[in-house]
Image (cartoon, rainbow, N blue to C red):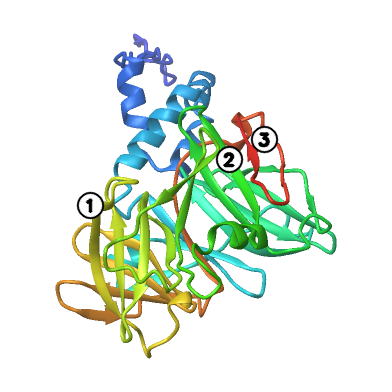
Amino acid sequence: MESRDRPSSSRRPSKRVRITATLPHIPDEIILEILCLLPVKSLMRFKCVSKSWREMISDPDFEKKQLAVAARDSGEVYNSRLIMHYPSMKLKSCPLSCLFYEPVGHSVNHEYPGSELGVMNEIIGSYNGLVCFCIRDTENDIIFVWNPSTREFRRLPPISFMQCFHLVAYGFGYDSIANDYKVTSRDTCEWFNQFRGVGDSENYYWSVVGLDLASESYRMVPLPECADPNVKPMIMALGGRFCTIFDNDEAVDVWVMEQYGVKKSWNKLATVPYFPDPMTVDCTKPVFFLRDGAILMEFYGLLVLYNIDRDESTIPTIYGTRHCHEVEVYLETIVSPNAYYRLQAGHQNGGIGRQGIS
């Protein structure tokens, strides 16, 4: 019987074909434009993509570009956070957008540098995403400049209580001429004696004095025509503009100076009724002004959202929060406090002490 060859039961292994996909080349300029629009948290993760991306995101020029984009939209709420300081020494933060556009907000605990050294005395201020605060231990005031978004910080040399026997007023700002962030300190007793009043012993009036961080010189700042010279003005920064508020019995008038130093540029933003009851204006602070006509106020630790068009006040709900000691708004940026190497401490009785960080 004739036999036939049967096909083998085992098949020859098929050849694997490797297909290599070539990604289109994207110019670095386009990548930079995209990256600077992303949240800081994403940028910190993207540093791990490659060495070139890490170098790109860490480059000082990219830091400036990302800051410029964030500052350009500083009137919006999506790239800003609210940081809240509580008497229990805790810090909490929440997105600013949840207070304006969401029915309920959620806060998170914020670990901050130096918490093991003593009690946080005050949040001095915030600028370009850097938050400056003071910790007080048994002997010293210790100043930190901190970026909560990247968790980088810089600790300044301590200021001893021997120097701080009187109450000290601290300030924090940016010198655009020297590209330098500066912390200032001033003995409030000396400040009071030099600038409180003009006239004889029975006729004093209050004046506002501004400090030029570039020249480190003082100048008088005019107040609105409605200002009562016999009443201490409450002054602060609001959205990068000089702001003052005046007590109006049952409400507060919020004024901003559109062009710094020009008296005619004063503009009244809103008259905000006290909430819930009339109280001293010293306990009142405008926190954030939204371009579409809403303003966030703090009344003695209570956050109140006032809609100017509807003349309506509401208390935003933020889970995990209650009455706070003080609040501050900061931009989410990648500005590094450690990029400024001339950070030094300084305090002078009867004069201005400054701590520069570039």
Q: Amino acid at mark 3?
A: Leu
Residue at mark 3: 343
Is 140 left, or right, of 342 in this rendering? Answer: right
Marks 1 & 3, CB-CB < 8 Å contact: no
Nearer mark to the viewer, of 2 and 1 = 1
Which quadrant of the figure contains the C terminus?
Answer: top right
Residue 38 spot, x, y in % from top left: 37, 39
Q: CA distance from mark 2 to mark 1?
A: 29 Å
Q: Residue at x 38, y 29 (%)?
A: 65
First in sequence: mark 2 vs mark 1: 2
Q: CA distance from mark 2 to mark 3?
A: 8 Å
- The total of numbered circles placed on residues is 3
Marks 2 & 1, CB-CB < 8 Å contact: no
Q: Residues within 10 Å of mark 3 (few under 14, many from 20)?
A: many
Residue at mark 1: 264
Q: Is residue 328 above or below residue 311?
A: above
Q: Is residue 37 visible?
A: no
Q: Residues within 10 Å of mark 2 (few under 14, many from 20)?
A: many
First in sequence: mark 2 vs mark 3: 2
